[in-house]
Amino acid sequence: MTASRSSGWPAPAKLNLFLHINGRRDDGYHELQTLFQFVDHCDYLDFKVTNEPALVLHSNMSEAVADNDNLILRAAKSLQKQTKCQLGAEIWLDKRLPMGGGLGGGSSDAATTLVALNALWKLNLPTERLAEIGLELGADVPVFIKGLSAFAEGVGEQLQAVTPAEYWYLVLVPDVHVSTADIFQDPDLPRDTPKLTLDSLMSNPWSNDCQELVVKRHPQVAKTLAWLLEYAPSRMTGTGACVFGQFEQEQQANDVLAKLPASIKGFVAKGKNISPLMLRLAQH
Ligand SMILES: C[C@@](CO)(OP(=O)(O)O)[C@H](O)COP(=O)(O)OP(=O)(O)OC[C@H]1O[C@@H](n2ccc(N)nc2=O)[C@H](O)[C@@H]1O
Ligand SMILES: Nc1ncnc2c1ncn2[C@@H]1O[C@H](COP(=O)(O)OP(=O)(O)O)[C@@H](O)[C@H]1O
């Protein structure tokens, strides 16, 4: 049997609309409270099922990632191992999201791989089981698998679906890589924000506990955020480096994008409380 190529599986970016660090666990991971919302700017993956268990990835990633480290192949291997599935896949990645920018592209690619191969290999694992497999790959993977904007606690795996307003965002990509592990290891990271109820978090002004430190360590982030703040309420996503400004109308976001100095990259995207991945899965 030669299966046909199943195309256009989106792996959307996420924004952390707020991010609070509440403490550090004994294993070094941090307790946090955060609000994840998807945006309609995505990587895209195609899959072709093969009868041999080999996994082959073709990608246009601008930064080399070894196959052993690539979250797509790690996700596919993990799914094979957990289900003893003897099928394989040829996978194509159209990488559009900046890497290591706090947009969760790697985690989203892993989630899309798990969701798509679960369908294409006809494994029928429930979403909760896929999310458990995903959590082994990264703290951010489960929210992409569940596909609903969510308030997250724990290390990011305890999820409660929420529906924040779906604004337009101008996302700017400073030309610097911020390592999530480095930020979480930094002694100057504030780790003592009190845990708050979801109701009070939704009504308080939103902020990111990593932002001050990242701005201090990375002048490119400081400069980019200062520029954006002239035009819109803006902050950092995740552990950076990307920052986003919030707009009521698409045109307003595009007008500011048009003013962007050539040295800074950016894109306009709309907040989505249902992941584009869920819509693609429904078409399968
Ligand atoms: C904090 C967030 C917010 O979205 O940052 P971004 O990666 O999006 O910037 C994420 O939850 C990150 O998730 P993810 O990028 O999947 O993290 P992982 O690969 O699991 O962990 C990377 C490193 O970050 C640290 N880490 C991560 C999550 C967490 N709750 N506490 C931590 O201390 C650990 O040191 C770990 O070695
Ligand atoms: N498919 C993938 N896409 C992006 N990054 C990947 C992938 N697989 C592994 N990685 C590694 O994960 C790191 C974090 O990637 P990414 O998820 O884009 O950033 P962030 O966690 O800051 O949002 C990258 O720097 C890269 O080394």
Image (spheres, helix red, strand yellow):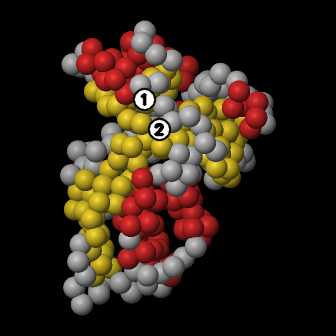
Q: Identify which amino acid the numbered label 2 is placed on.
A: Gly
Q: Residue at x 56, y 34 (%)?
A: 165
CA distance separating discs 1 and 2: 7 Å
| Picture quadrant of residue 40 | top left
Viewer-nearest residue: 115 or 222:
115
Residue at disc 2, secondary structure: strand
Q: Residue at x 33, y 39 (%)?
A: 98
Residue 180 appears in the picture as rendered: no
- Dots 1, 2 in contact, CB < 8 A: yes
Q: Identify which amino acid the numbered label 1 is placed on.
A: Tyr
Residue assigned mark 1 = 169
Residue at disc 1, secondary structure: strand
Q: Residue at x 21, y 52 (%)?
A: 60
For label 1, the crowd category at 10 Å Cα-Cα, with few meaning under 14, some 14 to 19 and many 20 or more, is many
Question: Taking 257 as reference, is 275 left or right?
Answer: right
Residue 79 appears in the picture as rendered: yes
Question: Taking 235 as reference, is 163 left or right?
Answer: right
For label 2, the crowd category at 10 Å Cα-Cα, with few meaning under 14, some 14 to 19 and many 20 or more, is many
Residue assigned mark 2 = 271
Question: Outermost residue toward the bottom?
Answer: 1
**Residue 35's spot in the image, x, y percent?**
61, 39
| Picture quadrant of residue 179 | top left
- Comes first in the chain, label 1 or label 2: 1
Mark 1 lies within 8 Å of ligand 2 (Cβ measured): no
**Residue 184's spot in the image, x, y percent?**
57, 36
**Residue 239's spot in the image, x, y percent?**
51, 34
Q: Residue at x 57, y 63 (%)?
A: 131
Tell me the quadrant of the picture where the N terminus can be found. Answer: bottom left
| Picture quadrant of residue 19 | top right
Question: Taking 254 as reference, is 129 left or right?
Answer: right
